[in-house]
Image: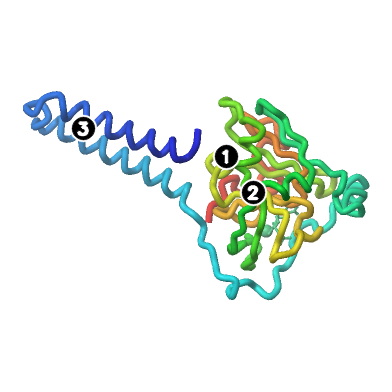
Amino acid sequence: MTLLTRRRLIGSLGAGAGGLLLSGCDRIAASPKVQDVLGLGEGLTMRAQRLVTDRTALAREFAASDMSPVFRTNGNTMPASDAYQAHAAARFADWRLELDGLVRRPQKLSLAQIRAMPARTQITRHDCVEGWSAIGKWTGLPLKLALDAAGVLPSARYVVFHCADDFDGAPYYESIDLIDAYHPQTILAWGMNDQLLSVGHGAPLRLRVERQLGYKQAKYVMRVEAVDSLARIGAGKGGYWEDSADYQWFAAI
Ligand SMILES: Nc1nc2c(c(=O)[nH]1)N[C@H]1C(S)=C(S)[C@@H](COP(=O)(O)O)O[C@H]1N2
Ligand SMILES: [Mo]
């Protein structure tokens, strides 16, 4: 279901319930009790709307002149695995992004195929919990298009990003819910600041989920998996830092 239909659904549910009550009978609607109920309904609808609106609002986008002269790297800057390093040496020519889990049509996409798909470019601010920020330009495939190509099943609730790197043998991974997955600014970025994404910044593909903090921006994404629960992934909290240092899973900014 698209965000638009979701929003319409909530809107029409609210209008439907109100409409039913109002069209019923003026005499009943005039009684204080019924007015309470109507008031409550309206409040709930508004709160539901606001929740949805907040989740779908766009992160601020900046002008080229706002871009940081230096965008530092953080966390892992070169996955240790031989397989990754062989792919990097070959400029990811034989590398494939896997897209599987709760999907109708599992995909294996080459970097060339991904770059041939429609791309979005956005200049946004990256905020790391360690206390630094940087404004950079990201270009990549809207995650929605990748998910639509695979046909996400109705039972899916989250999207997991499996990365090539690890910390002491624990693989880096991250996850987001479907609202963030279908958000228009959520992209699998292959370009940064008008260049191909460097290894330090997560080549060949890294997640940009612009409404959330730095550690959610998974680098070295090898596999995208649609799941119905995060319980069986890693230690079950939805991400490497969530599992190992109790970072918040929902790291909205
Ligand atoms: N795979 C992977 N993704 C990662 C990390 C990491 O160590 N490994 N570090 C995270 C953190 S804490 C931050 S702030 C950003 C840093 O991205 P950058 O190196 O492009 O600045 O990547 C995030 N994504
Ligand atoms: Mo970070």
Query: Marks 2/1: CA distance?
Result: 23 Å
Q: How crowded is mark 3: few (under 14 residues within 10 Å), some or many (20 or more)?
A: some
Q: Residue 177 carries which label?
A: 1
Q: Which residue is drawn at 40% across and 39% down?
A: 7
CB within 8 Å, label 1 to label 3: no
Asked whether 87 or 172 is in front, the reply is: 87
Q: Which quarter of the rendered image does ligand 1 occupy? A: bottom right
Q: Nearer the viewer, mark 1 or mark 3?
A: 1
Quarter assignment of residue 156 = top right
Is residue 70 positioned above or below 152 on the image? below
- The spot of residue 104 in percent (x, y) is 66, 25
Q: In the figure, is residue 9 to the left or right of 184?
A: left
Q: How many labels does the image show?
A: 3
Identify the amino acid type marked 1. Answer: Asp
Identify the amino acid type marked 3. Answer: Val
User: Of marks 3 and 2, which one's residue comes earlier in the chain?
Assistant: 3
Is residue 129 positioned above or below 151 on the image? below
Query: Marks 1/3: CA distance?
Result: 32 Å
User: Of marks 1 and 3, which one's residue comes earlier in the chain?
Assistant: 3
User: Of marks 2 and 1, which one's residue comes earlier in the chain?
Assistant: 2
Q: Name the residue under label 3.
A: 37
Q: Which residue is drawn at 76% across and 60% down?
A: 196
Q: In the figure, is residue 211 to the left or right of 102?
A: left
Q: Name the residue under label 2.
A: 118
